[in-house]
């Protein structure tokens, strides 16, 4: 029987799962692979590393700033661990930038907003969106052998941690909202609003990446191998399937993100229906 959102049992489950699955590692001592000139060119040609590095640094800063406002001891312990991991993600990206000579400068962090809880929630929904899309992009890149498998092994560790973060966040939000007496409709509307804000920020990051790369996008920056045979339908399906696969690693009693997988599932059904109609029309 599923635990009740907002209960002590629910809090204990999602916090202990997060804490107990922590993995200790130092980004500088990971087995970073040697890259040849073509692989280096592809890695350096990705126009988003500076934004990714800044985002990870800001994530650590937001979690650390929010931490003193978490009064529950067990939730506090889990959020503190998340702050450590977010800071380590930034260190991992910094290590990669330095090791492979990627052009990326460290930008000053924005001033923390007065409402740190809203900033934390904003960040959490942003991670949910980034991770869902990242699952599909990661699978596509790995299948295309865009970089050596050793590089993907390192980033798979990061992807697992991101998955842990979003499962923790979704359960934290359910626990928080239930304790405040919010009904399902209110919670769903709030989630949709925060996802909209996250999508707007993600679009801004993509546009900044293009600006930094002379207006070009990822597809024309010596990364054609990554997008060879790319189709939107396949990408959505990869996001959907990879999300389901990664979520199976967690206790089924835990809540999981539902909105983005549901939207993706609807989109896939619509795309398949469109394809069937298009095929019938071409045959007729």
Image: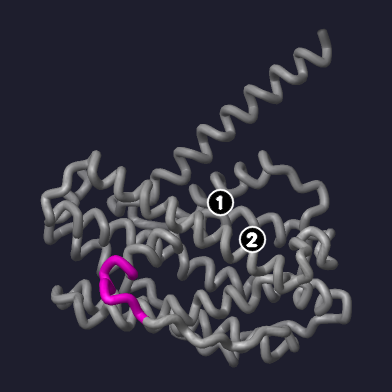
Q: Position of residue 242 (x, y in %)?
A: 56, 51
Q: Which residues are magenta?
A: 112-119
- State the residue at coordinates (16%, 48%): 182
Q: Is residue 184 depicted above or below 129 in this figure?
A: above
Q: Is residue 72 depicted above or below 189 in this figure?
A: below
Q: Is residue 119 left or right of residue 70?
A: right
Identify the image quadrant of residue 103. Answer: bottom right
Q: Is residue 126 left or right of residue 17?
A: right
Front one among 245 and 184: 184
In reply to whether residue 90 is colored magenta, the answer given is: no
Residue extending farthest to the top is: 284
N-term-proximal mark, 1 vs 2: 2
Q: Is residue 67 depicted above or below 119 in this figure?
A: below
Q: Is residue 85 visible?
A: no
Residue extending farthest to the right is: 37
Please report contact status of discs 1 and 2: CB closer than 8 Å, yes or no: yes
Q: Position of residue 221 (x, y in %)?
A: 81, 66
Q: Position of residue 273 (x, y in %)?
A: 63, 22
Identify the image quadrant of residue 113. Answer: bottom left
What colour scheme does the image use?
one colour
Which label belongs to residue 242? 1
Q: Residues within 10 Å of mark 1 (few under 14, many from 20)?
A: many
In reply to whether residue 117 is colored magenta, the answer given is: yes
Which label belongs to residue 138? 2
Q: Is residue 55 left or right of residue 30?
A: left
Identify the image quadrant of residue 1. Answer: top left
- State the residue at coordinates (17%, 43%): 183
Q: Is residue 239 visible?
A: yes
| Quarter of the C terminus within the rendering | top right
- State the residue at coordinates (24%, 79%): 77
């Amino acid at each position: 029987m599923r635990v009740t959102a907002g209960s002590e049992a629910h809090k204990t489950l999602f916090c202990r799962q997060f804490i107990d699955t922590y993995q200790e590692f130092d980004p500088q001592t990971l087995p970073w692979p040697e890259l040849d000139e073509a692989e280096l060119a592809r890695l350096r040609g990705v126009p988003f590393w500076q934004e990714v590095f800044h985002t990870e640094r800001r994530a650590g800063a937001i979690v650390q700033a929010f931490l003193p406002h978490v009064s529950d001891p067990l939730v506090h312990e889990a959020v503190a661990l998340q702050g450590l991991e977010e800071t380590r993600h930034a260190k991992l990206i910094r290590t990669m930038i330095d090791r492979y000579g990627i052009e990326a400068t460290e930008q000053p962090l924005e001033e923390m907003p007065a409402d740190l809880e809203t900033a934390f929630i904003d960040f959490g929904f942003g991670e949910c969106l980034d991770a869902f899309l990242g699952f599909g992009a990661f699978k596509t890149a790995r299948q295309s052998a865009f970089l050596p498998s050793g590089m993907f092994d390192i980033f798979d560790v990061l992807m697992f941690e991101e998955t842990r973060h979003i499962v923790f966040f979704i359960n934290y939000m359910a626990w928080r909202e239930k304790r405040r007496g919010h009904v399902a409709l209110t919670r769903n509307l709030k989630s949709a609003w925060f996802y909209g804000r996250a999508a707007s920020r993600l679009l801004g990051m993509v546009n900044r990446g293009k600006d930094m790369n002379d207006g070009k996008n990822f597809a024309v920056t010596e990364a054609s191998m990554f997008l060879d045979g790319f189709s939107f339908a396949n990408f959505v399906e990869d996001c959907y399937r990879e999300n389901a696969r990664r979520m199976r690693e967690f206790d089924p009693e835990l809540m999981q993100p539902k909105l983005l997988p549901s939207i993706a599932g609807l989109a896939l059904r619509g795309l398949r229906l469109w394809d069937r109609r298009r095929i019938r029309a071409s045959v007729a």
